[in-house]
Every structure is written in structure tokens, then in C-alpha cells.
Image (spheres, rainbow, N blue to C red):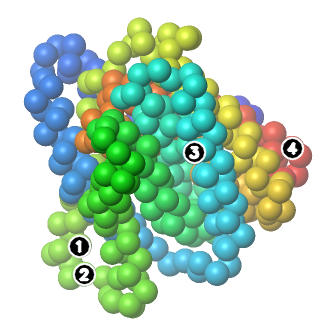
Amino acid sequence: MVQALAFAFAIVFPNLALMGLGFLMRKKSWLDTSFIDVASKLVFNFALPCLLFLSVIKSDVNYQEQLILLMAGVATTFGLFFGAELYAKFFVPNLPDKGVFVQGVFRSNMAIISLSVATNAYGELGASIGAVYMGLLTILYNVLSVITLSRTQQRKNLSAQSRDVIIKIFKNPLIIALVSAFVYKAIGLPLPPQPITKTGELLSAIALPLALICAGATLDVKSMLGLSGVSMQASLGRIVVAPLFAVLMGVAFDLSAVQFGVLFIMVSSPAAAASYVMAKAMGGNDTLAANILAFTTVFGMIGMAVGMAWLRVLGWV
């Protein structure tokens, strides 16, 4: 257990340090709202799409072997999404908060934290299975995020609102990048020429650090720690409800030990850094998104480590 917690701290510390840097820079007035807006747009429209595209085309995975795991992942995601939507309808009063709350509950940090933990737990097998899961579920995450965040821009009738959601889905840079990457791999094209790949890698490298710095600069510590606040409710949904629901789905789908472990790791990680970027880009409450990201980053890794330890004791992973 001690080793698991130590590993969790080693994984989470860089994220916390970058968010702390952003918080300090904002306190010192070294960056302002204009910088945060421009940097967030850079991450959302260019850096993060590059990161996702290159991650998929470089992966060497077998999708058919992981079909049951993917079905369990889809069922888990929909369960958390609709459960959070129902909760938000009755208990989250402010419109800009609703979509951010829902996204905070169902959307985990698969690309960075989950893949790292899965690789550490199961080696190359864990990395391969995790890459398959991440690639397909990230598309679903982004579609659902667009749907729930689109409520911020209200429309006069359901038809206009539905049309707006569909347009946002097809125009979402993250979805475009992932669909393009899967098509690229399906055709069997080689990796792009080295100069293009290197440029994409350099752009990808700034995605998460810059997103975390901007999130840290937007933090409202008093709101984040408010036990009755929406951020705390969403955070508890992410670090308590989501892992428990993943365990139920793992049992229901009778997953193998490795698949069970990967499902738990992918679902129980902290809120995704991209959730802040999308909330910012689509007019949601970005302060709330940053608070959820910070709280779950601090405490979510501890919950993941404890959960994996118990599942290993039970012989399920």
C-alpha cells in the first residue's frame, strides 16, 4: 500500500506543481485573463488535437481482442453521464455550472495519468490495452462533453439547439483529430515525414503543461474547498462514485484481471485536463472546472491507489 501511494504521488506531483505555478503567477499578476484566454484557445485548437492524433497513429493495438472491455467502458461512461445529468437537473441550479459538473463526473484523465498507471501495473500489455480504450473512449468523452456544455448557449427551440450541438460535435478539434487518426491508421499509411512529426511532437508537448498552468491560474481555493459547493459534489462523483461504478461494470461484464484493472484505472483517474479547456472554450464555468481538476488531481490519485490495492487483495485485478 505504501509503495502504491508513493507511486501515486510521483505521478501526480508534476500536475500539481504546474497548477501551483499558474496559481502563483496569477497571484503575482505575471499573467492575466487575456493570456489565459489565448493560451486556452491554443491548447484546444492545436496542441491537444496534435497530442491525440499522434498518440493514436503511433499505437500498435488490436481492437477485436478488447471488445468486451470497450463495451464495459462505453456502459460505464453512459451510466456516469446520465446519472450526473439527472443529478445536475435537480441539484445544480446555475446553467453555466451544469455541463461542467456533468463533465467533471464522467470524464477522467486517461491520456496522461491512466495510461501511466496502466503501464506501471501491467507493462506493455497494460499500455497496449489502455491505448485502445483511450482512443475510442476519448471520442465518446468529447461528444458527450460537447452535448452537456452546449446548454450554456440556450436556443429558442429544441430543433435549433440540437442542430447547434451536432455542428459543435463535427467542428470540435479533438473529435476531428481522433477520427482523422483512426482513418489514418485504417488506411495503413506510414508515419508522416520526420519534419512534420517532429513539429507535431513539439506542439503536443505544450498541451498539458499549458492547460494545467491556465487551470491553476483560474483556481478559486475557497470555492474548491467549500464542502457544500458544486465543485465538491462533482469531485466526490469523480473520485468516489466513478470508481465504484467501474467496479460494478467490471463484475457485470466478467472482465479478465488485466481488463478489470485497466477499466478501473481508466475510470478512476482525476478529472481530465481537457475538461477545463473545453469548458473555457464553450462558455462554461471555467473556475468551477479548474477547481474540480485541482481537487481531483490532489485526492483522486490516492483513491486510485487504495482502490487498486483492495482489488488486488480480492484477486480481481
Q: Residue at x 33, y 89 (%)?
A: 189
Quarter residue 14 falls in: top left
Label 1 amino acid? Thr
Give residue 142's position: percent from left, percent from top.
Answer: 42, 54
Give residue 298's position: percent from left, percent from top.
Answer: 51, 27
Q: Nearer the viewer, residue 64 or 167?
A: 167
Q: CA distance from mark 2 to mark 3?
A: 36 Å
Residue bearing mark 1: 197
Q: Which of the labelled discs sits on residue 192, or is there none?
A: 2
Q: CA distance from mark 1 to mark 4?
A: 43 Å
Q: Is residue 241 left or right of residue 168?
A: right
Label 4 amino acid? Val
Query: Is tag 3's residue or tag 4's residue first in the polypeptide sequence?
Result: 3
Q: CA distance from mark 2 to mark 4?
A: 45 Å
Residue bearing mark 3: 81
Query: Is tag 1's residue or tag 2's residue first in the polypeptide sequence?
Result: 2
Q: Residues within 10 Å of mark 2 (few under 14, many from 20)?
A: few
Asked if one can make out residue 2 in the rendered structure from this viewpoint, the answer is yes
Q: Secondary structure at mark 2?
A: loop
In the rendered image, the quadrant that contains the C terminus is bottom right
Q: CA distance from mark 1 to mark 2?
A: 6 Å
Q: Which residue occupies the extreme front position in the image?
A: 157
Q: Residues within 10 Å of mark 4 (few under 14, many from 20)?
A: few
Q: Residues within 10 Å of mark 3 (few under 14, many from 20)?
A: many
Mark 1 and 2 residues: CB-CB less than 8 Å, in contact? Answer: yes
Mark 2 and 3 residues: CB-CB less than 8 Å, in contact? Answer: no
